[in-house]
């Protein structure tokens, strides 16, 4: 069994920064690709940032240039550095990853971490 556990959310003022982390534990051999999604109240879940196993990245239009996604294959972790945060970035942020456990690759979701941007 594989678990993704996010951390690093919280309350920050507009213009501030936060760094989210996602740790994969359990029967993890490698993370094939992964990324971050978010869901604000009353809105659909949207893609924030994705990173492939070759470190190619894709960002949502609203975060391009402000957010950066990272991966650490030695630790089986993903991270999201968020700068110049805006109130519109307020949402629950979810880690998503395709994890290879030695036999097959499956997609997993974390439980989510709240990010609130407010003065």
Image (cartoon, grey):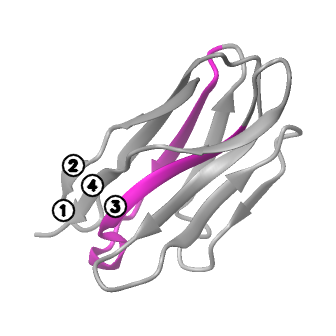
Q: Are marks 4 and 2 in contact (CB under 8 Å)?
A: yes
Left or right: 113, with 2 as reference point: left
Count of numbered circles in the view? 4
Element marked by disc 4 = strand
CA gap between label 2 and label 1 equals 10 Å
Element marked by disc 2 = strand
* Quadrant position of the N terminus in the picture: top right
Numbered circle sitting on residue 92: 3
Left or right: 58, with 113 as reference point: right
Residue 115 spot, x, y in % from top left: 28, 57
For residue 48, which quarter of the picture? bottom right
Classed neighbour count for the residue bearing mark 1: other residues with Cα under 10 Å, few (<14), some (14–19), many (≥20): some
Q: Residue most toward the left?
A: 119
User: Does label 4 or label 2 sit earlier along the sequence?
Assistant: 2
Residue 45 spot, x, y in % from top left: 49, 73
Q: Do the residues labelled 3 and 4 touch (CB within 8 Å)?
A: yes
Element marked by disc 1 = loop
- Residue drawn at (46%, 53%), measured in percent from left and top? 94
Which tag is nearer the camera, tag 1 or tag 3? 3
Q: Does the magenta stretch include residue 83?
A: yes
Residues drawn in magenta: 75-98
Residue picked out by circle 1: 13
**82 shown above or below 53:** below
User: Does label 2 or label 3 sit earlier along the sequence?
Assistant: 2
Numbered circle sitting on residue 114: 4
Classed neighbour count for the residue bearing mark 2: other residues with Cα under 10 Å, few (<14), some (14–19), many (≥20): some
């Amino acid at each position: 069994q594989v678990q993704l556990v996010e951390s690093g959310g919280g309350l920050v003022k507009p213009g501030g920064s936060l760094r989210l982390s996602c740790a994969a534990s359990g029967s993890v051999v490698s993370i094939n690709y992964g990324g971050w999604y978010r869901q604000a109240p009353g809105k659909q879940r949207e893609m924030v940032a994705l990173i492939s196993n070759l470190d190619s990245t894709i960002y949502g239009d609203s975060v391009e240039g402000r957010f950066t996604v990272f991966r650490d294959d030695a630790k089986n972790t993903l991270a999201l550095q968020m700068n110049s945060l805006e109130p519109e970035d307020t949402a629950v942020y979810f880690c998503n990853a395709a994890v290879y456990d030695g036999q097959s690759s499956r997609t997993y979701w974390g439980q989510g971490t709240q990010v609130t941007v407010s003065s």
